[in-house]
Amino acid sequence: MRAYTQEEKIQGMMERPIPKKKVGIVHLEMIKESRCLYGMKRISDSKTAAEMVRPLLEKADREMLLVLSLDSKLEPMALEIAAVGGVNSCLVDMKSIFRHAILNNAAYVICFHNHPSGDCEPSTEDRVTAQKMEESGKVLGLPLVDHIIIGAEGSFLSLAEMGILNNRFEVA
């Protein structure tokens, strides 16, 4: 049997590549699961935004993160539950936050999360995560207008109004 040189072995591999891994061929498609009525009123402040999502968050027994996609007039387009956590924390992946907004061709996003304890005071992690969201949104061209914490008995807290975020409810 003939011994092949290193160069001949490489040439042979180039002519007959050995598949190492199957690569999936995919496409993205957004499917609207359902719709709900919302007056096509522009969301102009954190109170209006908080009132819109309160029914989804106020009775939750775990932390949840919601992302509201807005059009260029700050009118709601879609709402997604981006993450569900435990009693006092929720792991947040930046890709998950902005994925549905990109698929919706949104111009802006607002994030919401609840505190099952009812206390709206933001933790250090809440502050850091909101700032990461804001930076990620800038990179993607999808400004984070606000991050709102929903508490008990109608309470809420806007991180933009606290000065933790730089964006406001203003159309560019």
Image (spheres, rainbow, N blue to C red):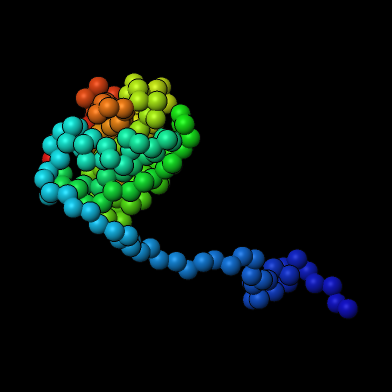
Look at the picture and state if 169 lies above or below 17. above
* Residue for point 40% across, 25% down: 117
Q: Residue 74: x percent and y percent?
A: 16, 44
Q: Pick whichever, 119 or 138, lies toward us.
A: 119
150 left or right of 82? Answer: left
Q: Residue furthest bottom?
A: 1
* Residue for point 69% across, 74% down: 12
* Residue for point 11% across, 45% down: 41
Which quadrant holds the C terminus? top left
Q: Residue 77: x percent and y percent?
A: 21, 52
Q: Quadrant of residue 55?
A: top left
* Residue for point 35% across, 64% down: 29
- Can you see residue 128? no
Look at the picture and state if 127 lies above or below 90. above
- Can you see residue 150? yes
Look at the picture and state if 165 lies above or below 85. above
Q: Pick whichever, 123 or 16, lies toward us.
A: 123
Q: Residue 126: x percent and y percent?
A: 38, 27
Q: Quadrant of residue 139?
A: top left
Q: Pick whichever, 19 or 120, lies toward us.
A: 120
